[in-house]
Image (tube, rainbow, N blue to C red):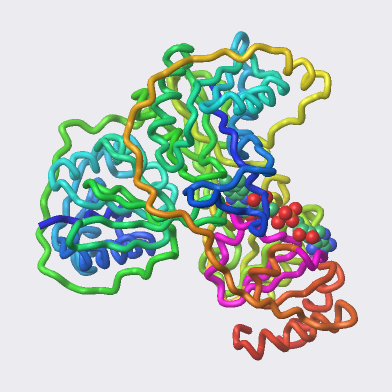
Amino acid sequence: MSLVLTCLLDQGNLSRDSLEVLGAGKSIAAELDAVLAAAVIGAETGAVCAAAGEYGASKIYSVQDAALEQYYCEGYLAALEAVCRECEPAVVLFVTNAQGREMAPRLAKRLGKTALVDCLSFNADKETGRIVFTKPVFGGKAMAQVAMSDAPAVVAMRRRSIEPAQPEQVAAETIQVKPSAIPPNPFKLIERVEEQTAGVRLEDARVVVSGGQGLGGPENFALLEELAGLLGGAVGASRVAVDSGWVSSSKQVGQTGKIVAPDIYLAVGISGACQHLAGCSGSKVIVAINTDPEAPIFGAARLGVVGDYKEVLPPLIEKVKEMA
Amino acid sequence: MVCLKQILDPELPPRDFRLEKGEMTPATEGVPLVMSSFDQNALEVGLQLREKIAGATVTAVTVGPEGAEDVLRKALAVKADRAVRVPLEQDCKLSGGIVAGLLAGAARELGADLVICGRQAGDWDGGQVGLILSEELGWPGANLVTGIEPGSGGLVLKRELEEGYEVLEGNVPLVAVVTNHETNVLRIAKVKDTMAAMRKKVEQINVEPQGGRLELASLEIPVKEVNCEIIPGEDGGEKADNLIKRLLELKVM
Ligand SMILES: Cc1cc2nc3c(=O)[nH]c(=O)nc-3n(C[C@H](O)[C@H](O)[C@H](O)COP(=O)(O)OP(=O)(O)OC[C@H]3O[C@@H](n4cnc5c(N)ncnc54)[C@H](O)[C@@H]3O)c2cc1C
């Protein structure tokens, strides 16, 4: 029986990313009539192995080693490669987060394959074992259907494109895998600076107020901060605003930034490039404020305000204050 | 060695994006070709590092047809020391492993000890070449790097985290895969350097392409149907009022 291997790279608790990879794995396994398996790596894998079983993985491959206490690409790759050699999966699944982005291509190469990252959906055919993955290309201006027929298909799904797995206790078997060697981390960590965000995280926010090039400068982000604060939301940005140094890059929304899906996504002075929309198209209502009635953002927004944000935001903020 | 790809201008609006009739590739006629944006960031990282290490040189390498030499000229215009093209006629689309193999061949031939790539090309958005390259060469790879400095014990790399950043120290040889940051926006070439770059030599390194191709089953332009409702109003105040009214009606506020 063929096997779908989901790579869970958490320590301790299953993250939303891992639940999404399990969710994707579960539906592919169902379509292929395959076993849902999970790879769990760390210094102490017990908790994640147990959690994987509670979410439907019936075979759990654990690589436990003190060297693997924290994620580093070379070590985790060696662990995953050993798991793949042990279980010969038909499909290996990641989520396109920082780890999945770097692991999937390198693991695939080790297994003699080419990976596919940032996929949105899939279609599996039980008869042939062929799975067709849909991946946006050209910044989302086109959709490519890529057929993966020889095992293993190594794929990373775009975040928030797959429903997270629901709990489903199965009889799970845990197999300990010992890689022949775990290479040391070739890089020495000098410093790690975690950014502290006041208020809600961008990715969890129900309201996101994003600014782009049209804001004209960093000082004008204060208006967005104020509005986001009043609505209990978070501030995001376009890549141009990040590249201009107006906001930190952790605020970038888009294909190569954060993927958000709030109730309200307010795009201020953002033209609506596909690469940006890739990060917010799952929003319930996109609202655009833009001086240019021809801006592509009006082809993606549900509500549009044609005008200068400097004339629209201040009264909007006043009005929201009155309502509170 | 900095890897640069020539691509269709990714800023082309969707309404002007078309596919070649009957082929799984976009129409190129009338569309400007540019250096992929993350490769520009990679080039800037390389140039800044060279300024800090005596005797270091930057070699710009592209894989592609002769026309792709335009991106090498752009690199020469911002003072890359050398420019090399590895000839390849057909577009590899999503099969980045083939390109990585060619770049690895060039890196060996050039005796490079640091290879810098952009995180993903703005055409097929594959996001793999730099990573596969580190496997090909058997060198450590760091993803999402925004800057590199010389350090006491090797190179110091700054890289993005989900929230924040980290600073790593590593020794060459290594592969750095670069993402955008305010500190690595590509400098603008001087007019006289752009002129001079036209006359500079582009070298050629031939490498045998290897590796399998992914099977592209179809390529389609998605249909998006969103009817944008323009909020009426004489001035900012009225528009703000009407916007809030609609958000309340849609029950998202
Ligand atoms: C491979 C690749 C990946 C990318 N990834 C991302 C990504 O993750 N996220 C991202 O955002 N971009 C990304 N980009 C960049 C993207 O293609 C666009 O360049 C970028 O999104 C444009 O940013 P912008 O909308 O702020 O700027 P612009 O396109 O310059 O738009 C500015 C807008 O502001 C409007 N404006 C000006 N003044 C005012 C005013 N006073 N009031 C109201 N409106 C005003 C203008 O009409 C214009 O529409 C990527 C590109 C590539 C090639």
Camera-side residue of A106 and B93? B93
Q: Is residue A267 above or below residue B56?
A: below
At horizontal 11% and vertical 51% (from top left) the residue drawn is: A175
Is residue A275 visible to the viewer in this orientation of the structure? yes
- Asked if residue A22 lies left or right of residue A310, the reply is left
Q: At which x and y percent is residue A157?
A: 39, 57
Q: Which residues are magenta?
A: A265-294
Q: At which x and y percent is residue A45?
A: 22, 52
Q: Is residue B66 above or below residue B23?
A: above
- Asked if residue A202 lies left or right of residue B187, the reply is left
Q: Is residue A157 above or below residue B138?
A: below
Is residue A284 in the magenta section? yes
Is residue B139 in the magenta section? no
| Residue at the farthest bottom position | B249
Q: At which x and y percent is residue B194?
A: 77, 22
| Residue at the farthest front position | B22
At horizontal 51% and vertical 41% (from top left) the residue drawn is: B120
At horizontal 16% and vertical 51% (from top left) the residue drawn is: A61
Q: At which x and y percent is residue A78?
A: 25, 36
In which quadrant is the C terminus of chain A drawn?
A: bottom right
| Residue at the farthest right position | B234
- Asked if residue B208 lies left or right of residue A251, the reply is left
At horizontal 72% and vertical 72% (from top left) the residue drawn is: A227
